[in-house]
Image (cartoon, coloured by chain):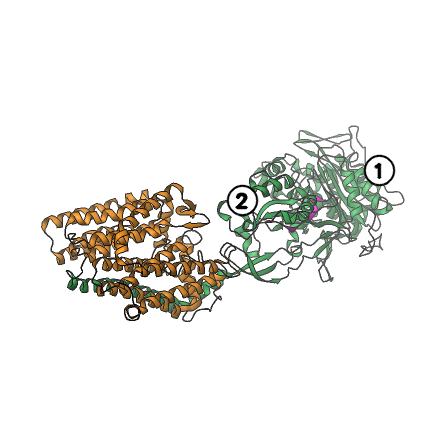
Chain colours: A orange, B green
Amino acid sequence: MALTGRHIRELFDWPLALSAVGLVAVGWIGLLSATGETAASRVQGLATVQLVWVALAFTAAALAVWLPLRFWYGISYVAYGVGVVLLVLTLVHGARGMGAQRWLALGPVHLQPSEFGKIGLILALSRFLSHQRVSMTRLSHLLVALLITLVPVALIREQPDLGTAMVYGAIFLPMVYWGGLKNLHLFAIIAPVVNAVCAFAGWIPWTAFCLAFVGLLFLLRPSLTWTVLLVVINLTVGIITPAIWDRLQPFQQRRIETFFSPEKDPLGAGYQIIQSQVAIGSGGTWGKGFQQGSQTQLAFLPETHTDFIFAVLGEEFGFVGALVILSLLFVLVWRIIRMALVGNNAFASFVCIGVASMIAFHSVVNIGMTVGLMPVTGLPLPLVSYGGSALLTDGLALGLVLGFGLRRHE
Amino acid sequence: MQNGEHAGQHGYRSAVLMAVIALAFLVIAVKLYIIQIADHEEYVRRSEQNAMRTVPIEAVRGRLLDRDGNIIVGNRPAYTVGVIPAEVQDVEYLDSVIAPVTGVPRQTLIAKVRGRHRRLHRPIELSRDTPFRTIAYLEEHRHQLPGIVYFVESRRRYPYGRLGAHLLGYVREVRESQLNALKPEGYSLGDLMGQSGVEATYEEVVRGVKGEEYQEITASGRVVQSQRREPVRGSDVRLTIDLGLQQVAEAAMDTIKRGALVAMDPRNGEILAMVSRPTFDPDVFSFVVPPEVWRQLNDDEERPLFNRVTMGTYPPGSTAKMISAISALENGILDTTTRLRPCTGTLWYGNRPYRCWAGRGHGSLNLIHAIEASCNIFFYQVGERVGIDRWGATARKFGLGQPTGVDLPTEESGIAPSNEAYHRKFGRYRWGRGEALNVGIGQGITLVTPLQMVRYVAALGTGYLVTPHVALSFLDPDGTERLAEFPKPVPVAVDSSLLAIVRGAMILVTEGSRGTAHRSRVPGFKVAGKTGTAENPHGEDHSWYVGYVPAQNPVIAIAVICENAGHGSDIAAPIAGAVFRARLLRQERPEQPEGVQMVQSSDPAPPHP
């Protein structure tokens, strides 16, 4: 069914599109500030480059809106497969940068396949989960979904890029939850993860976890088999976590250590977190003004144009500016999740949940990092951070969601 | 593909998802509130601290001038070559050019630029005290060598080499181990600091006041804006040293291996020349001292860093016989006519022979001729009669056994003997009564420094005990001259008639037929002096000379010791004579640069009180 003018007027989700455009605009302002005269020469002029990426992302979004639902359903497994192949290529031929191997050189452009891989994963999971005979109440189906997720995760872990690998997990969980995962099973999946984090953090968080664990077991009232299984798994996790710690990459260990106590190493690994907090904190209510942030302009902030763009904006536009960004992101995520409800197509609904999860997770982890609530993971802030691959991915994803909105009655 | 099966459940599940996300956003908003509004002030303070840096600017050290304004220790520019990693384009190429030019080993530059400093805008040091030729080359090829910089530091220049090394002292960079103690005084790592001699005593005067540059910097050290507070250069110190005389003294002392010489104006304590042998080259301390050089200087048995003028302690030998004489006269033990037992070359006391240096003996002598001939037998008897305590008391009147108060960092007090001192050294009455005899000829436990001896001989000549000093005045950068102040000379508590008797005897030492210091004579002037031969348990005798000239109104007093060199009359007296003649006959004056003459040097002046 062709899209008519009436469709576009009535069914196009303007709040979603406008909040996305707003975020891109805010990001570009931050980029102007982060790459101004005082910045290192290697980042100067990136604001212009970003305009090209914005145009490309806009084209990608328009393309995604224009292509029918059937097309996306059809290519979902192919897209996933291509994504996996690209990840393998990256491992073999990838360009090195920042102690990791994440980029694939395409002529002068460095692409990050793990970004595009997210779309592949969302499409593939959506197709699998929307299949009528697939039910998340069945363990075998859950395991297939898990396998679909773990293949790219394993490849990214090899790069190594813990942050992006975590995003894949963050996409998987809400989607299977949306697919009807039982609360008990959700609990069984989440508990060991929270358990591991708490075990890292020390005795007090771990004790708190144990209490919450027992409380939830009591609420969910699982069968005896499940209870025994959950207890055994969680005890094992609690015990082997220190062993896993030893096998992490040194820079991953440092990042985790630094997250728990950044002040211990103010010039080394803790530097980024401290400087970022100083930048945001010194911004105050209204901020220091555009291109007036001393932390940014004097380059005390690391990676201002990518991972720490929120700190630039927080310093120069203050609490008010930060709340505006938070609100835009929240509106964006809310409109996408709403889109999952209004359509009558299960595949589209799953895609929307996947995209919403991806954007929400990126936002929370990135901003959480800049304010010192989360470890340094290197996840960009969606639509705001500089970076072509991420922007193209986000544009494509939002285009899909907007397109599904227009075709919600098909 | 139809959705609806889970429609009701989806409403609930979307609410759960939104709630989780909303909660996360809320936590972030609260944290933002905490750091941006609640703790705002604290973060503002930290951000300001971040952006400002204070870079100290070295002050040029004050120079050391001789009494006529000749520069003895000056300053020279020293060039340090560095590399700013952030500006380097082709590190391999740069390394291949810089290594042969500066003499820095290959790969050094690559190693410094790589590593963790790659984005640094602050220079990293490559080569210090680089020859000017290299700097000229770098300047010429500046455009082909991006990232290479050089800066000028001020270093000590010693136009006369080793001249007066002990007196002037040396400077060294403040080391890590000293930093904690020196930080409160404003020193930082690598600052030059006087470590001995005048450089140390007048450190506060010559070091100047460091300047500061307040820089607004980026995290990698690139300066965005800066403000300067200029450093204040240190004041010059005009020394009492007479360059020409110092040169003569240095040349004269080159004839011996170990020893010391100090020449002083007896009227006011101004030190005119000071030499210690062996010596060292103060220039080796200008930059980081290689450990092997430092070890060599410290382990050398001859102790070249040791200033023997203020720190060397020796038995005074016969040069102390004037103390015996005065002690005997003031205690009424003898007068100028008294003759003691004649000298036959040996004096038996108890069961031990005490010998005179003249084996055949001097015969019967009075006090004056005993000094002239330096007869030991006569002074053994004086020592016995005066006793250790009274001898020591007289010695202290002339400043022995106590610091002279000289403006140099370390000086020994020596020992003026007393029964108490003997008890302390050997145990109560564990020493023989014959020790009094030894004291009488300047042996025993008495120990003196050459500086104490020049002060003592000057006091004999003038009747006043002065504070020896090396600083005359301080020339501030604004042109004002402040005089260095020292305690005024104090009269020696000895009757002037007694001093006159001894002076007469000392003239005979040089001029008399039996005198031992003929070789210190100055044509046209009467020299008063005394040689000495100090026995020491470790080897050959030390050769002493003390004296002053002109005898009537002295303008220069001198003390010379030559370690293990034998008789004073043979070695020390000729050295002193050369210095005397230089002072009085104005031979061998250095060429005076135009316009530097600041104060008329004092020529033989009217009689002193």
Discs 1 and 2 share one subunit: yes
Q: Residues within 10 Å of mark 2 (few under 14, many from 20)?
A: some
Q: Which residue is mark 1?
A: B518
Of marks 1 and 2, which one's residue comes earlier in the chain? 2
Q: Nearer the viewer, residue B170 or A59?
A: A59
Determine whether, in the image, residue A262 is placed left or right of residue B373.
Answer: left
Q: Which residue is mark 2?
A: B112
Instruction: Specify the quadrant that holds the N terminus of chain B.
Output: bottom left
Does the magenta-highlighted stretch encompass residue B168? Answer: yes
Q: Amino acid at mark 1?
A: His
Q: Position of residue A11 (x, y in %)?
A: 27, 68
Badge nearest the viewer, 1 or 2: 2
Q: Secondary structure at mark 2?
A: helix
Q: Position of residue B67 (x, y in %)?
A: 77, 52
Q: Nearer the viewer, residue A279 or B242?
A: A279
Q: Which residues are magenta?
A: B146-169
